[in-house]
Amino acid sequence: MRETFEHTYVASTTLCSLVLMHNSHARRRVYRDTRTWRQRLERQQSNWNAIFTSLTDAFLQWKYPTTAPDPPTTSRDTPEARAPPSPTDSPSPIDVDPISYDFTIDCVDLYTLSTSIHVPRTASMTAAEALMIQGYLVTSPVDPTLAISVKTLELFRRLRCRKASLSVEAYAKVLCDLYAVSK
């Protein structure tokens, strides 16, 4: 009698576990993408077109940084002639944005082999623009999760110019080897 009870208890516990496991999977909703390939490509193109101008400006800002020329020094600019800063010279609390728009993102950079970077960003910048100012191109214009350094892409372009048979797959495998990523 005792063996039957234990056997029934184990069987019912197992059955309950299976039912709970099945119900938890049944609750997951799977969405089917009903867009056509053409619609996907059009959406992708429109997303890139929306940020193309700002991305170009950010690239030029990264590639050719402008440095302000040093103003000529006069006798009033010497340390002895300067007055100590007054409390009114500091920015007021209204001028400082209390919200930080900075973010960290995974990256691929052949030269530094870093796996993530911290990107400073202002409220008026998109994530793609902020990354381009730092020298990284996003893999997606909307909600990016990975950035590739422009220098890494430039190296690939130059290698392909010299050896056209170098495949994207071979270059990707080299990057995976350097990052110690296995299949």
Image (tube, rainbow, N blue to C red):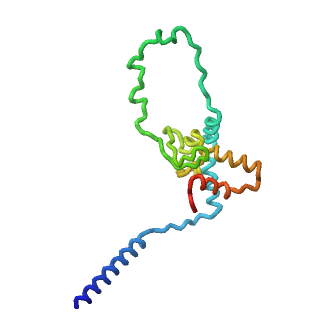
**Observer-nearest of 28 and 1:** 1
Rendered residue at 53%/44% (across/down): 127
Q: In this view, does 4 lie above or below 97?
A: below
Rendered residue at 25%/87% (across/down): 5
The quarter of the rendered structure image containing the N terminus is bottom left
| Residue 50 seen | no
Q: Which residue lies furthest to the left in this view?
A: 1
| Residue 167 seen | yes
Q: Where is residue 124 in the image (x, y as percent from the top left)?
A: 51, 38
Q: Position of residue 131 (x, y in %)?
A: 56, 43
Determine the image quadrant of residue 169. bottom right
The quarter of the rendered structure image containing the C terminus is bottom right
Q: Is residue 167 left or right of residue 91?
A: right
**Observer-nearest of 100 and 179:** 179
Q: In this view, does 101 lie above or below 26?
A: above
**Observer-nearest of 104 and 142:** 104
Q: Which residue lies furthest to the bottom in this view?
A: 1
Rendered residue at 45%/68% (across/down): 29
Q: In this view, does 49 lie above or below 7?
A: above
Q: Where is residue 102 in the image (x, y as percent from the top left)?
A: 47, 41
Q: In this view, does 11 lie above or below 109?
A: below
Rendered residue at 56%/57% (across/down): 181
